[in-house]
Image (tube, rainbow, N blue to C red):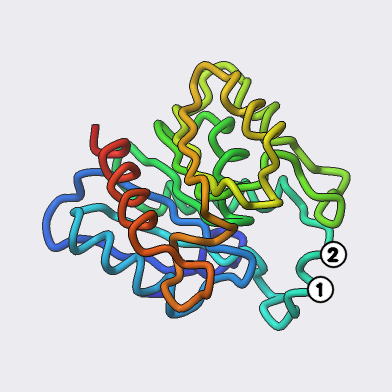
Amino acid sequence: MRIALPSGCPAELARPDGEPTRGVVLLPDIMGLRPLFDDMCARLATEHGWAVCAPEPYPGRESLTVEERLSTPIDDEARLRDIVDAADALNTEPVGVIGFCQGGMYTLKAAGTGRFDKAVAFYGMVRTPDGWRSPTTVEPLDQLAKPGAARVLAIVGGKDHWTPPEDIEALRALPNVEVVVYPEADHGFVHDPTRPVHRAKDAADAWARAFAFLNR
């Protein structure tokens, strides 16, 4: 069901029939909250017993095109506030965070807020792209190095230009980060089966690793 976070940001909330085994904030890709992620929230709640909340990354600006989204500065202070508020809306503990693409980058940033116990970033940018920088920008690597940062599983594709080898090595150097690279995969290979880059076998393996990490 749709809820509004304290800022007015819309979010999808799904809960299992019984008591949740954990909470998860789900961060969509650059195209935002849509049926793909509504269905994902419902599936994760039903199949894994999680309470799940997915906030809209562009509240009030959902009509932006992909090109506009790629070149529009982002207020990290506001984005991270909505992500933490989404965690609070779950009314359960512990809470992890999962994100894809741009949402994967914000998963890495959210890991440093101290609100989450675990984070799974699917092909999240390790350094903030220039088009998204603003006066409130915080860098993923800086966030991950903060005291009390969440344990992280970073899932990346070996052919993804958004996560070049030097960025992957920077992630590997952090003691709280585990990195899994799928050598033949490109950006976005897991979460949307309709995309040409989708790799069913790699996606299934990546999801299995994510579930094991969060349920461990």
Q: Please give the label number shown on residue 124.
A: none
Is 61 positioned to the left or the right of 136 in the image?
left
Mark 1 burial class by Cα count in 10 Å: few <14, some 14-19, many 20+: few
Residue 111 lies, with reference to residue 69, above or below; the image says: above
Instruction: Classify residue 216 by image quadrant.
Output: top left
Q: Position of residue 50 (x, y in %)?
A: 25, 52
Q: Position of residue 78 (x, y in %)?
A: 69, 52
> Amino acid under label 1?
Glu
Is 53 positioned to the left or the right of 143 in the image?
left
Q: Residue at x 52, y 52 (%)?
A: 184
Q: Please give the label number shown on residue 68.
A: 1
**3D distance between C-alphas at marks 1 and 2:** 5 Å
Question: Under tag 2, what secondary structure?
Answer: loop
Mark 2 burial class by Cα count in 10 Å: few <14, some 14-19, many 20+: few
Q: Please give the label number shown on residue 71.
A: 2
> Amino acid under label 2?
Ser
Q: Residue at x 67, y 68 (%)?
A: 58
Instruction: Report whether residue 207 is seen.
Output: yes
Instruction: Report whether residue 84 is seen.
Output: no
Front-most of residues 127 and 58: 127
Is 202 positioned to the left or the right of 105 in the image?
left
Could you tell me if the residues under marks 1 and 2 are in contact, i.e. CB atoms within 8 Å? Answer: yes
| Image quadrant where one finds the N terminus | bottom left
In this view, the residue farthest toward the front is 184
Q: Position of residue 70 (x, y in %)?
A: 78, 65
In this view, the residue farthest toward the bottom is 63
Q: Position of residue 63 (x, y in %)?
A: 71, 83
